[in-house]
Image (cartoon, helix red, strand yellow):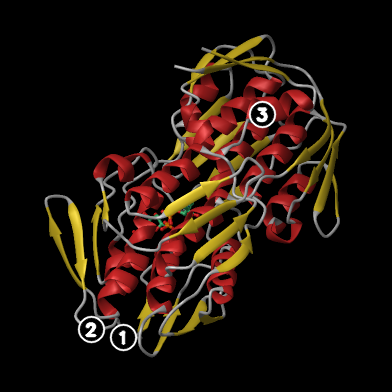
Amino acid sequence: MQKLRIQGGRRLHGTVRVAGAKNAALPIMAASLLTADPLRLENVPQLADTATMARLLGAMGVAVETTEDGRTTLRAGEIRSVEAPYDTVKTMRAAILVLGPLLAREGAARVSLPGGCAIGARPVDQHLKGLQALGADLHLDQGYIVASRSGRLRGARIVTDMVTVTGTENLMMAAALAEGTTVIENAAREPEIADLAACLNAMGAKIAGAGTDRIEIEGVDRLHGACHRVMPDRIESATFLAAVAATGGEVRLEAAAPATLDAVLEKLREAGAQVETGADWIRLRMDERPAAVNLRTAPHPAFPTDAQAQFMALNCIARGVARISENIFENRFMHVLELQRLGARIDIDGHTAVVHGVEALSGATIMATDLRASASLVIAGLVAQGETIVDRIYHLDRGYEAMETRLAALGAQIERIR
Ligand code: UD1
């Protein structure tokens, strides 16, 4: 199993180009199922998860062509299979995003229920409730959601019980081809939803309000091909920024979207970093030991749960005590035990972690447990004294493109070992 070997203690300096957003690319790739025409995408990140989505769509009959510069063309001329098998869904929950498009275009889908995952129960009841409101007939068969419809889906007013990102995306895609108007109330406001809506609108959909908590979708008879550039990855940006705030140094992020990172940038400034931004770049300089920063994760535009672990690593070596409360997932503190092995002082009380900053961490062998937890362990390794080995980095590869190469280019001493 591949690992990362890190010699901590180097400050980071230089420029890094932010990749396209994984969480925008995945729903947008699934949107290719909504038309027989080609969907041409730019800035698709080359990740394990985007490769999994490409394989899943390929098995359904979508012709997928990817070039190294991040251009991907998907053409769902004829859909041969409407099944998302368990083996795929269990490795990548976002596979559930094929449900809405398949139901809308083909009138049938058979998608494995995701089941539990490392960071919590993560049910998909809101996806199902919303699709039923649009007229879908759904039942469970041996762990699979079996979906069908008689006639077209029909527009409806849907109020979700909680804010769900992929739920909003699934419903938006299904409603794009429904008859009449759909309104999603309590919609997620994540920037990736606005990016998906921009792509769907370029394909001929009529969606207004994406990025707010009320999205209105006027259904159309058919969608057509389009070109779309995937937005920059704000979580990857937050990860690099937290790393530099922890190690000290000065780094410029290019091809970034600072407007999607308000809560993160505010916390970095609170920690003592000097942060400057332009339309598509962010420069962060850190000359001092960071100050502890309290965090509360919540749906966008509040602080993202996907950056919680990375900011916990930063707090481990900060001056003072930080309270970090995780309000999206019930079991998203698995990095804590690993950080403790490096000497971090963290107490957990329910969904709050209290981090007592220590002057230094010391290297050890630690194990990645999920995608963002892995990123936090890498940050901790970059600041720890001596050698840290991060095991099971296949989790990291799900969401970060060549992380070690890009950190090494900034001056980190980090390499992949087998
Ligand atoms: C998406 C992101 C993930 C991020 C998360 C929260 C993608 C591919 N993944 O995941 O990186 O961490 O948003 O920002 O974009 N819930 C239900 N029933 C549902 C749906 C959700 O109870 O039908 C609960 C979940 O268990 C969780 C909360 O709602 O507690 C938010 O989940 P959701 O926004 O749906 O997360 P994902 O879309 O799976």
Front residue of 38/34: it is 38
Query: Would the CB of label 1 be found within 8 Å of ligand 1?
Result: no
Label 1 Cα neighbours within 10 Å, binned few <14 / some 14-19 / many ≥20: many
Q: At label 3, which amino acid type do we have?
A: Gly
What residue does disc 3 label? 357
What residue does disc 2 label? 151
Label 2 Cα neighbours within 10 Å, binned few <14 / some 14-19 / many ≥20: few
Query: Would the CB of label 2 be found within 8 Å of ligand 1?
Result: no
> What residue sits 68% from the left and 59% below the top?
260
Q: Are marks 3 and 1 in contact (CB under 8 Å)?
A: no
Q: At label 2, which amino acid type do we have?
A: Gly
228 shown above or below 21: below
Where does the image place residue 66, in percent across and percent down from the top left?
55, 46
Asked where in the image residue 13 lies, by quadrant, the reply is: top right
- Residue 405 visible within the image: yes
Of all residues, the one furthest to the top in this rendering is 386
Q: Are marks 1 and 2 in contact (CB under 8 Å)?
A: yes
What residue does disc 1 label? 154
- Residue 316 visible within the image: no
> What residue sits 53% from the left and 21% below the top?
340
